[in-house]
Amino acid sequence: MSRFLLDTHAWAFLHLDRSRIPTGMMQELETADAIFISPISAFEIAQKVRVGKWPEAAHLVGRFPDLIGRDGTQEAPVTAAIALLAGQMDWPHRDPFDRFLAATAELDDLTLVTMDRVFATRPGLRTAWES
């Protein structure tokens, strides 16, 4: 059973430029049992658009809730257990968005789809990108 959590950039690439996702990874996503996106990614996109760091994603901000489901994804829960793990995990990476995504993937037994190599430094976290 293949269950994935999309990193923020992976979800955005689905809507901005699918060619940025490796072909093998796209094939895995097309046959996945479930694909999740965290509400934390909505916050990350909105924040980066607001401060001018990701202007090309501006049109995704208002459409985020409508795109979930239509794009084959489901909304992953953000629970107290996820928040606590994100805050307490023994991992030197300090980015709060990444910590929430790692905690979500770990607690919900999901493979995180990401090109960000920092996630490889988190012991036990399953990631995928190059397939």
Image (spheres, grey):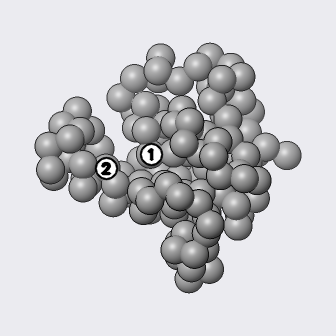
Q: Are marks 2 and 1 in contact (CB under 8 Å)?
A: yes
* Mark sitting on residue 129: none
Residue under the image location 55 percent in, 69 percent down: 86
Amino acid at dot 1: Thr
Q: Where is residue 49 in the image (x, y as percent from the top left)?
A: 20, 47
Q: Which of marks 2 and 1 is nearer the N terminus?
A: 1
In the figure, is residue 77 to the left or right of 122? Answer: left
Query: Measured along the vertical axis of the image, is residue 87 above or below residue 114?
Result: below
Looking at the picture, tell me which residue is in the foreground, 47 or 123: 123
Residue at disc 2, secondary structure: helix
Residue named by callout 1: 8
* Amino acid residing under circle 2: Ile
Instruction: State which quarter of the image contains the C terminus.
Output: top right
Query: In front: 61, or 20?
Result: 20
Question: Please, which residue is most extreme toward the right here?
Answer: 1
What is the x, y in percent for residue 101?
54, 57
Task: Report the residue marked by disc 2.
Answer: 45
Q: Which residue is drawn at 63% across and 46% down?
A: 121
- Residue 14: x and y in percent read 46, 32
Taking the view exactly as shown, the residue that stands out farthest to the front is 92
Would you identify the image quadrant in which residue 106 lies? Answer: bottom right
Q: Rounded to the nearest whole Å, what is the CA distance between mark 2 and mark 1?
A: 7 Å
Element at label 1: helix
